[in-house]
Amino acid sequence: MFARQFLITLSLSLLLASHAFADTIAIIGTGNVGAAIGAEFDEQGHTIIYGSRSPSGLKALDLASKTGDGAKTAKPAEAATAASIIVLAVPGMAAVDVARGLGELDGKIVIDVTNPLVVEPPLTFTFGVATSNGQLIQDALPTARVVKALNTINWQSMLDPDASAGPLTVPLSGNDEAAKDKVAAMVTAMGLHPIDIGGIETSHWSEYGVVVMLNNQFSERAGFEMHLREVEQE
């Protein structure tokens, strides 16, 4: 555990020390979540490409102009081809189909921030897949290195984690340890606290927690946000 934490800390130090270690990151999706992640990763020195079905549209171009000098727009598959890291920030029930349309992603890191939510009347959220989006996306992209991350916090907390009452823990699921360490360093640089919860099959745990949270928020019961925090082991 100590060696793993050392590697994450070292990766973070290199990430912050020099833009020579920056990556080209494709953010697939231009909604609030994609915009927040793009802004945060741009601050870390990465080059951002927003993947949009309308890359020449005003929404995508405006987002790129607000993100940073080097931010660009492209069709989703073109953005993924040009990047070493891909972030899936699309509606959860479309995520697997979008992933399949990105082309060959052999060896690339795919960060899945989605939740497979289905809304039923009057306003009830249910879990829309048999396993999890993380598992299904890894199955659809067998040669990519899928990491489930950033799906349990809202986009406002991504931009301003200090606004919460304490440090926010981000669970990470994935089968590739090096990919998880890389994502953990990026999450740490956002001011968040990553914690490894296991292989990609554990994506179900974090995704389903969001269903519980949303059903309370949109009901007569007391609403809450799901802020996870690591505890010290005795």
Image (cartoon, helix red, strand yellow):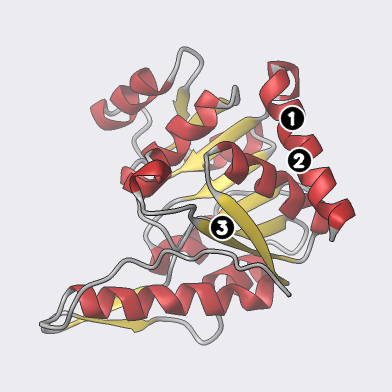
Looking at the rendering, in which quadrant would you find the C terminus? bottom right
Q: Disc 3 or disc 2, which is closer to the eye? A: 2
Q: How would you rate the neighbour count of disc 1 (Cα within 10 Å): few for under 14, some for 14-19, many for 20 or more?
A: few
Residue farthest toward the right in the current orientation of the protein: 3
* Horizontal and vertical percent position of residue 67: 40, 23
Corner quadrant of residue 121: bottom left
Circle nearer the N terminus (1, 3): 1
Q: Is residue 210 visible?
A: yes
Residue farthest toward the top in the current orientation of the protein: 69
Q: Which residue is mark 3?
A: 149
Kind of residue at disc 1: Ser
Q: Which residue is more in the foreground, 4 or 28?
A: 4
* Horizontal and vertical percent position of residue 186: 63, 40
Distance from label 1 to label 3 (Cα)? 20 Å
Q: Kindly check if marks 1 and 2 are in contact, taking CB atoms under 8 A apart as contact.
A: yes
Residue 58 relative to residue 5: left or right: left
Kind of residue at disc 3: Ala
Q: Which residue is mark 2?
A: 9
Distance from label 1 to label 2 (Cα)? 6 Å
